[in-house]
Image (tube, rainbow, N blue to C red):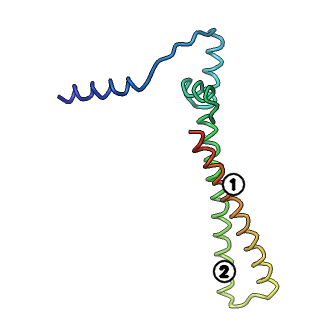
């Protein structure tokens, strides 16, 4: 019974997909496969994304990795801010000029974070529309 269910499921999947055969020179196929190895994507993915004018899977991974790195940078900065706050609390003193400078940097950081988030939202929107 289980084997029959799998067979029916496979037929459903096969009905959703179609094979296309492309004739091209061996050298062209080798070039395409070389590109796929470098980008760590399948030949099918390369062709479909190129035809549909969509972002390649490797480029999508690089964009997401960049976003993650950017977010990690802000996390490190925020950690440093907390360390400064602990240091000041331990001393129970901070000069007015240091407070002013620190607040200016916090405002700048907040503005940069907002800009980054707006850029990320646009990138995510582009990635979602490209899928």
Residue name at image x 72 percent, y 90 percent: 93
State which quadrant residue 15 falls in.
top left
Which residue does the numbered mark 1 point to in the structure image? Answer: 119
Q: Taking 75 as reference, is 44 left or right?
A: left
Q: Crowding near pointer 1: few (<14 within 10 Å), some, many (20+)? A: few
The disc placed on residue 66 is none
Q: Is residue 131 above or below residue 7?
A: below
Give x and y (percent) for residue 36: 60, 26
On screen, residue 97 above or below 45: below
Q: Is residue 11 left or right of residue 76?
A: left
Q: Residue at x 67, y 81 (%)?
A: 87
Count neighbours of disc 2 (C-alpha within 10 A) and say few if under 14, some if 14 to 19, many if 20 or more: few
Q: Quadrant of residue 108?
A: bottom right
Q: Which residue is mark 2?
A: 85
Quarter of image, res 91:
bottom right
Q: Secondary structure at mark 2?
A: helix
Q: Which residue is located at x 63 percent, y 36 percent? A: 55
For residue 106, above or below residue 10: below
Q: Residue furthest right?
A: 97
* Above/below status of 9 relative to 123: above
Locate residue 82, reporting x and y percent.
64, 75
């Amino acid at each position: 019974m289980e084997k029959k269910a799998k067979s029916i499921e496979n037929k459903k999947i096969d009905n959703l997909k179609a094979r296309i055969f492309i004739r091209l020179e061996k050298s062209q196929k080798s070039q395409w496969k070389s590109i796929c190895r470098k980008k760590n994507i399948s030949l099918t993915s390369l062709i479909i994304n190129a035809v549909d004018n969509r972002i390649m899977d490797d480029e999508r991974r690089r964009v997401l990795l960049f976003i993650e790195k950017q977010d990690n940078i802000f996390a490190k900065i925020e950690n440093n801010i907390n360390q400064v706050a602990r240091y000041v609390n331990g001393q129970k003193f901070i000069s007015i000029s240091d407070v002013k400078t620190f607040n200016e940097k916090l405002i700048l950081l907040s503005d940069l974070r907002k800009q980054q988030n707006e850029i990320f939202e646009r990138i995510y929107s582009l990635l979602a529309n490209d899928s």
